[in-house]
Amino acid sequence: MFFWPLMRAELDRELLWAGAVFFMPPVSSIEELQETMARLRGPGGCPWDIEQDHQSLAQCLVDECSELLETIDKLDMDHMREELGDVLLQVVFHAQLAKEKGHFDFEAVAAEINEKLIRRHPHVFGDVDLENSEQVLTQWDAIKATEKAGKPVSSSPFKDLPPALPALLFAYDVFKQIKKKAIPVGESVDMDAIEAMAAELDEEAAGHILFEIAAACRLKGIDPESAVRKFARRVMAESEELTEDTKEEKIV
């Protein structure tokens, strides 16, 4: 019996000839994407793709996520599909880099997040009864804490803050952690003024204020991203110091 090499695109066809029938199952799009990336990174591939590493691709991921967010804001479904693909490409690219170093592959990434989703949704995949989204989030945090038990963790009250966020989202999440965990704040934060502003604020007004601040920064030669990030880090430092002082007082 003879076998002929097949192109990948032929694998979803039934191959028929006298005396024999072979069936190869259809190839998924994600498998094809992984193979394309491996080819781009392999011998005779693309010089640019071959030169990349995790660090060099970091800004690409930020840029692609930003472009995706723009399509979400506009509910532009056609372009959203395209931008989701660009973000997926970054995931596949990083997984390919890790695979080449023997760390993990895309299958491991997909399997891990799938297992996490099942584990953190016992109200769907188990016998836990929950009534609302608030209970779901509380349970999620409890399961997450259990998973991290025994592992080295930072003592900072902001340890759950996602790293490498754009500056405005970074500041947003710093304040989110402050409210969620009742973290003490220093003199840099006027909670009464913030709450008074929030009472009068809507989306249009917020956009107006933020735009004018960005424009004024441009006229003054100030980098708004850097300014917001520095101030948010100052708030964090003050809160961390106050938290440590509170711990020491309790010990005494």
Image (tube, rainbow, N blue to C red):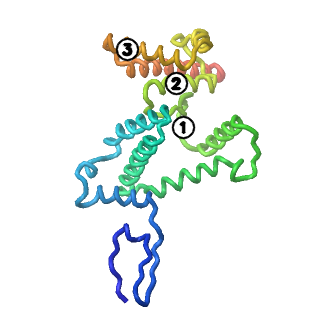
Where is residue 182 drawn, in percent x and y? 63, 22
Label 1 SS: loop
Res 164 → quadrant: top left
User: Compared with residue 45, is residue 5 higher up or lower down, i.e. above or below?
Assistant: below
- Secondary structure beneath disc 2? helix
Q: CA distance from mark 2 to mark 3?
A: 20 Å
Q: Are marks 1 and 2 in contact (CB under 8 Å)?
A: no
- Residue denoted by label 1: 153
Which comes before the other along the chain, label 1 or label 3?
A: 1
> Which residue is depicted at the point 53% across and 34% down?
154
Q: Nearer the viewer, mark 1 or mark 3?
A: 3
Is 98 drawn above or below residue 62 in the view shown? below
Q: Which residue is mark 3?
A: 215
Q: Could you tell which of marks 2 and 3 lies nearer the N-terminus? A: 2
Provide the residue designation for mark 2.
172
Q: For label 1, count other residues whose C-alpha is less than 10 Å away and answer few (under 14), some (14-19) or many (20+).
A: few
Asked if disc 2 and disc 3 are in contact, CB closer than 8 Å, the reply is no
Residue 58 image offset from top left, x and y in percent: 36, 40
Q: Quadrant location of residue 149?
A: top right
Question: Is label 3 in a helix, a strand or a loop?
Answer: helix
Q: Position of residue 38 (x, y in %)?
A: 34, 58
Marks 1 and 3 sit apart, C-alpha to C-alpha, by 40 Å
Q: Amino acid at mark 2?
A: Tyr
